[in-house]
Amino acid sequence: MNKIFVKELSNYYEKEIEFQATVDNIRNLQWVQFVILKDSTGKVQMTVEKNDENKKLNEIVNSLTIDSTLKVKGTLKKAPKVKLGGMEIIPTKIEITSLSEEEKPFNYNDLENVKLDTRLDNRFLDLRNERNSAIFKVQSLLTKYLREYLYNNNFMEIHTPKIIGAASESGSEVFEIKYFDKKAYLAQSPQFYKQMAMSAGFDRVFEVAPCFRAENSNTSKHATEFTSFDVECAYINSYEDVMNLESEMITYALKKVKEEMGEEIKRIFNIDIVVPKLPFPSMRLSDIYKELEERYGYKVDKSETTDLTTEAEKLCLKLAQDKFNHQFIFVTDFPADKRAFYHMRDKDGKLQGYDLIWNGVEITTGAQREHRYEEIKKNAQSKGLGEDVKFYLEFFKYGCPPHGGFAIGLDRLTMLLLNIPTVKEAMFIFRGPSRLNP
């Protein structure tokens, strides 16, 4: 693991180095050969003069193709006239570690007229595109700082099973699998296990892991498998504590990403990252519909007022900007019967939870959970849930602190951060109703 990366090369001027990289471009001129080499951190020029001493090196360069990989030994020289970092590698030995075929399914540096399905079929090539590669550098950094905030605030990272024995939560939209001689299911979320951790006394936990939803949804923001960032914490006073935690975590992560990659994101995506102000604004669902009608003439049918419609979600960005000068807005006071049975209701039956909308798209459903055994048992029964949640109800029999949490889809979060038109591009490998490969 002693590879030298492009971003580290300035530490090796006038030193003999071994450098491994991929061929990005070749300029074979009359008296000299220029080979542009790249790795995940940048590009550097290798210069080979054409002469008798370099005859073997010249022959190797003549045989090269774009995207071949090399192991180069040579000396790193300062070269102020070279645009790529003012440096160049003068090789003494070149070894081709893999030779790329010249004909490719498409030119990954020019994707304008390439169909998305073609790109996804050849994702390994598609991700060589600078923009597409940068998406996952940003996603990795974003995940790092979401994690960092939680670690700094006494959270423990856990890992819960993805193969479960009961069709939990709603009992629908789950993938059934064969588990030896039994039926099993892929987990929709780690929700029950996060709450088990609360019962176990872990107090503050989170998990970054895949979730599976058997939804036949072919929209720009849905997938059948996605990466969820799940958080749960104990000893809260209300769901507002959960809202404050999430808003602080997101603000921390966006600030860090802007500091570290803001200029690169601006260059590649033409986006200025906006670090949100605290606290995030919050409105009741009924008040949002009232203001959407008064401000923008958007009137929704009464049958749809129990949740946010897709159009209402989009208008929430305009509302948040016009009313609060903000990109985020919490939506509260959803009808209890429209939410999961483990969401707490107050003495009047009012749901103790929220949605978080960012840039006109819902990114989170969060809530205070019901931790009282008799109450959660009653809620489960009202939803027609019995044996499937029997193991889950056991968590609350022997004392469980007040707690709450939320989940964020990392892929959707990345899509919104970088203004990408579809979540398919914000996922390393997309899974949807009609895509199971590669």
Image: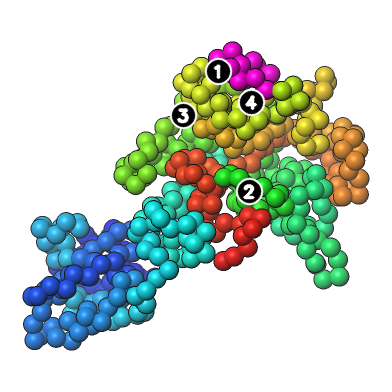
Position above or below: 165 against 395 = below
- Image side of residue 369 versus residue 152, left or right: right
In this view, the residue in front, 331 or 115, is 115
Residue hosting label 3: 276
Can I make out residue 146 in this image? no
Residue 133: x, y in percent? 41, 56
Name the residue at 9% across, 75% down: 30
Give how far apart the Cα atoms at labels 2 and 4 are. 25 Å
Name the residue at 16% across, 62% down: 87
Give how far apart the Cα atoms at labels 3 and 4 are. 17 Å
* Residues rendered magenta in the picture: 285-300
Cβ–Cβ under 8 Å for marks 3 and 4: no
Q: What residue type is labelled 1?
A: Tyr
* Lower sequence index among marks 2 and 1: 2
Residue hosting label 1: 296
Q: Does the magenta stretch include residue 293?
A: yes
In this view, the residue in front, 168 or 217, is 217
SS state under label 3:
loop
Q: Which amino acid does label 2 sit on?
A: Asn
Q: Which colour scheme is used?
A: rainbow
* Lower sequence index among marks 3 and 2: 2
Position above or below: 174 against 298 = below
Displayed quadrant of residue 12: bottom left
- Image side of residue 269 versus residue 413, left or right: left
Residue hosting label 4: 331
